[in-house]
Image (cartoon, rainbow, N blue to C red):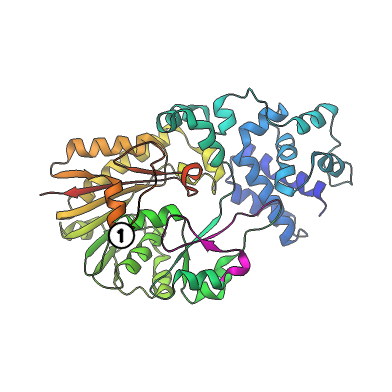
Amino acid sequence: MRPGARIQAAAEVLEDIFSRHQPAATALQDWGKRHRFAGSGDRAAIGTLVYDVLRRRLSLEAQMGSAAPRALALAAAPKALGLSPADVASACDSGPHAPAPLSDEERARLEAGVPADAAPNVAADIPDWIRPFFERAFGDRVIAEGRAMAERAPIDLRANTLKAARDKVVTALVKLDASPTWLAPYGVRIPAPEGPARSPHVEAEAAHGKGWFEVQDEGSQIAAALTGAAPRQQVLDLCAGAGGKTLALAAAMQNSGQIYAYDSDKGQLRPIFERLQRAGARNVQVLDGGDKDALEALGPRFDVVLVDAPCSGSGTWRRKPDAKWRLKPEALATRIEEQREVLSLASGLVKPGGRLVYVTCSVLPQENVDQVAWFLGRSEGFEILPYGDVWRSTIGGEPPASADGSAETLLLTPASHGTDGFFVASFKRAR
């Protein structure tokens, strides 16, 4: 497909997303089924263009003076497809499958870029109702933080030290420009692709099949490391999902002690079994998903309880940009209640002297520092552990500054740390 046809296809997919409220992945899959002639390279380029639009939807609207799918696809095409504005204009004059030729106004707007006087939420590409929450977290850095969350994300991997050292993984993936991560001690990063280039399918690599690494964002790796899980301990991963942090804990514990992995959604938990086998993790007991009675029957036995709480997912907007526009206030309120429920459940499972580690992949204060204040206000016997002290005793070295300026809890962000958005708070049960 020529560039013009790819732009037109992206506009059609965006129309489905906007008018039918479809998730981007579903809309792209449906388009592919209707257009089976499109090759894998074409589908990848169209997907890249669609996701780039969703990452920067508001600023592209401001640039083009229109929210129409055509206008947004045109505005995103230079960066997404590696074209100049003149190339985009030429692509729209090149055949029956291309968009209609650009108007004089479209040409001018394409050349001009985003207006310098765009409103803060527009420049940051975040919904306006979210802007006050970003201001609470980031102060005068709202635009910088928002723009970083509107960029493409790299692929981060965690070397599975049960089977391979990080250097070995980097060497195995050198053809993909792999390099060690900045903060996570076992992390490996493959840079985000530019233009129409595709991200590599790292799970097709032999090293993945051998269990040498798992795909895991650097922020998630840091959160797991800050639990301080160590050999011979009793550890609970309370919201285990597909098991990414469970696997990191197993490696940190060197396959000794015991990890219990639980999730209220058995469907989310299902992939963990194959991942445990591939990774060689042998100290994990997977509880039946949703069996809360069996979980509570374990009692306060755990040295570490990790709560990777259900949240808005605002920290992952680089990877799931359509979720940024689908999030609604009522959904956020529901997540906040769920977080309080799981924190209350977790607090009864920590033994005296043990730790509860609360994690979200969110940057919103309501899900982070506000929940910490709520928990401390109702949970006798728990105290906050300053994240800097925890960092020095687990990861080692001097910790980075939290993106929100806190000395007690850690907020990681794309702009400040190059990670997804992650929040980590550590509590100790004194009695």
Amino acid found under the numbered disc labelled 1: Tyr
Rendered image quadrant of residue 164: bottom left
Depicted 341 relative to depicted 216: above or below: above
> Seen from this angle, which residue lies furthest left?
431
Question: Regarding mark 1 in the picture, which secondary structure is present there?
Answer: loop
**Magenta segment main secondary structure:** loop
> Seen from this angle, which residue lies furthest front?
397
Depicted 41 relative to depicted 28: above or below: below
Q: Does the rendering let one see residue 263?
A: no
* Residue 214 in the image, given as x and y percentages of width and height: 46, 66
Judged left or right of residue 125, residue 41 is right
Judged left or right of residue 417, residue 1 is right
* Residue 208 in the image, given as x and y percentages of width and height: 51, 72
- Taking the spot 17% from the left edge, 59% from the top edge, the residue there is 297
* Residue 252 in the image, given as x and y percentages of width and height: 32, 66
Depicted 39 relative to depicted 115: above or below: below
- Taking the spot 30% from the left edge, 59% from the top edge, the residue there is 262
Judged left or right of residue 224, residue 157 is right
- Taking the spot 74% from the left edge, 49% from the top edge, the residue there is 81
* Residue 51 in the image, given as x and y percentages of width and height: 63, 46
Reply yes or no: does residue 88 show up in magenta: no
Q: Does the rendering let one see residue 216?
A: yes
Query: Which region of the structure is painted magenta?
Result: 173-195
Residue matched to label 1: 262
